[in-house]
Image (tube, grey):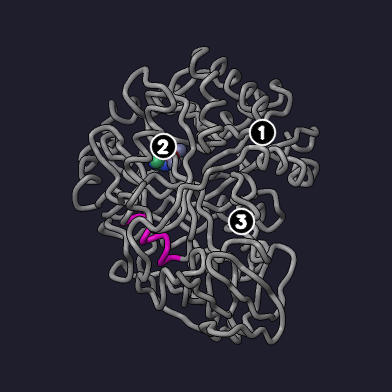
Amino acid sequence: MKMMKTIIRQGTIVSPSEIYEADILIDGEKIACIGRNLESEGAKVIEARGKYVIPGGVDVHTHMDLLAGNSRAVDDFYDGTVAAACGGTTAIVDHMGFGPDGCNLHYQLNEYHHLADGKAVIDYGFHGTAQHVNQDILDELEGMMEDGVSSVKVYLTYDRRLNDGEALQVLKRMKKLGGVTAFHCENHEVVEYYRSMYREQGCTSPYYHAKSRPNLAEAEAVARILSLARLAGDAPVYIVHLSCKESLEAVLDARKKGQKNIFVETCTQYLTLTEERYMDKDGLKYVMSPPLRTREDCERLWEGLAAGDIQVVATDHCPFNYGIEKQLGRDDFTKCPNGAPGVEERMSVIFSEGVMKKRISLNRYVEALCTNPARIYGFYPEKGILQPGSDGDLVIIDPNKEYVLTHDRMHSAVDYTAYEGMKLKGQIELVMQRGSVVAEGNVFKGKRGAGRFCDVIHTDVLRLFVLFCSYSNA
Ligand code: URP
Ligand code: ZN
Ligand code: ZN
């Protein structure tokens, strides 16, 4: 079959360190060449003058088809990745959910291959989930890596949390293997204490969801896990969905003391939405953990992102219908499934609220939403950067277009967007995945099942720690 060629003409190409005007020639699935006045016989030409051309977004925190208690996240790997593609994201790394009691890591990996293979429209990887620890699980981590899963997530809250001793064992083994351990940091006992207290007092509205998960319950857990990572010889540690200023201070303190290999993720919602939402009549839409915080927290996170203290902006996309699943929490916030959608909104909302409002530079935007996530989870340089040899994954953004974000524009199966009515500057015009157009003018143009499992080679993960020493020493 003849390979398709495309020239993206005269776009403004953005990387973490450069902004320059050039043409991009994509031959088949790969970028063949970047330069001026490129020509190639038979190539389709896409004009991009006056527009930004950035690498495809990489969202390393999604929960497609997640089974959480009795509720299932409403985006499966088809709907969720169609939404991602239309929103400018061309690769995800999904957090596998908890499996049955006592199951091993490969049990869930097999489950997730069943859920994603043949459905995903963009490329994808998985994070393992360590829901209990014993010698067999620790030994299995190496096999997971050989099977393309270079990271494992540990929860410090919820029913399948690990205790500190177990978390330490995972950190030590992952360090030896050259992988990353990701942590959901909240102090479980503190959260449980507040949840029961509020329930007993009859304080069951969504507002008390936020009140029961205070900033310091998160920051304490962040500081604790950083101490354990230090104890494990500066084991690579990745803090997921960091949401507040106290947690960021804990990270900066550890780095100041010389601790290396700390990677920090925040999410779109923690940068842009605040806890007042819980007082609205549809407050259940925002029940997620950690909860939304204050304007002051948002501003501190923007500063941290601008300074390079935060490496990644992800989404924690975990959609439940407001009209159905979220209503389980109508009389008691503790019954509401935790999570909110966001995979489709991330690239546009952060471009508008971050770049256009001058809170972060265009380079930082690309670094935190495309390049760093690809580096940390071993997809780089195939993904996360526009250079010869990389995958033809790219997004064209027109910075001069404005629109209002509304649910009827969205492709996710969920019945709301948390960003309803937000006025956005800058519009995604075209999205390509490995040389094929997957979205154009907000219309999905890809193919069911065209996404590939990204088999991460863990020697790449080892290499990135060298690349990231700069963060550790900042
Ligand atoms: O509320 C959230 N964040 N739900 C998804 C699971 C998790 O904790 O990441
Ligand atoms: Zn979490
Ligand atoms: Zn999550």
Distance from disc 2 to disc 1, alpha carbons, whole Å, reads 20 Å
Is 186 colored magenta in this rendering?
Answer: no
Q: Position of residue 374 (x, y in %)?
A: 60, 51
Q: Is residue 27 visible?
A: yes
Residue at figure coordinates x 32%, y 71% from the top left: 409
Residue bearing mark 3: 382
Which image quarter: residue 365? bottom right
Residue bearing mark 1: 236
Which image quarter: residue 332? top left
Distance from disc 3 to disc 1, alpha carbons, whole Å, reads 22 Å
Residue bearing mark 2: 96
Q: Is residue 210 visible?
A: no
**Quadrant of picture, ligand 3:** top left
State the residue lying farthest toward the front.
1
Q: From the viewer's perspective, is 350 left or right of 459? A: left
- Mark 2: C-beta under 8 Å from nearest atom of ligand 3: no
Secondary element under disc 3, as helix, strand or loop, is: loop
State the residue lying farthest toward the top.
135
Q: Position of residue 234 (x, y in %)?
A: 72, 28
Pointer 2 and pointer 1: residues touching (CB < 8 Å)? no
Q: Position of residue 337 (x, y in %)?
A: 30, 40
Bounds of the magenta span? 79-87
Q: From the viewer's perspective, is 396 left or right of 440? A: right
- Mark 1: C-beta under 8 Å from nearest atom of ligand 2: no
Residue at figure coordinates x 45%, y 52% from the top left: 452
Binning the other alpha carbons within 10 Å of mark 3 as few (below 14), some (14 to 19) or many (20 upward) gives: many
Q: From the viewer's perspective, is 308 left or right of 96? A: right
Residue at figure coordinates x 75%, y 37% from the top left: 255
**Callout in the foreground (3, 2):** 3
Q: Position of residue 399 (x, y in %)?
A: 55, 79
Task: Choose between 279 and 319: the one closer to the eye.
Answer: 319
* Amino acid found under the numbered disc labelled 2: Met
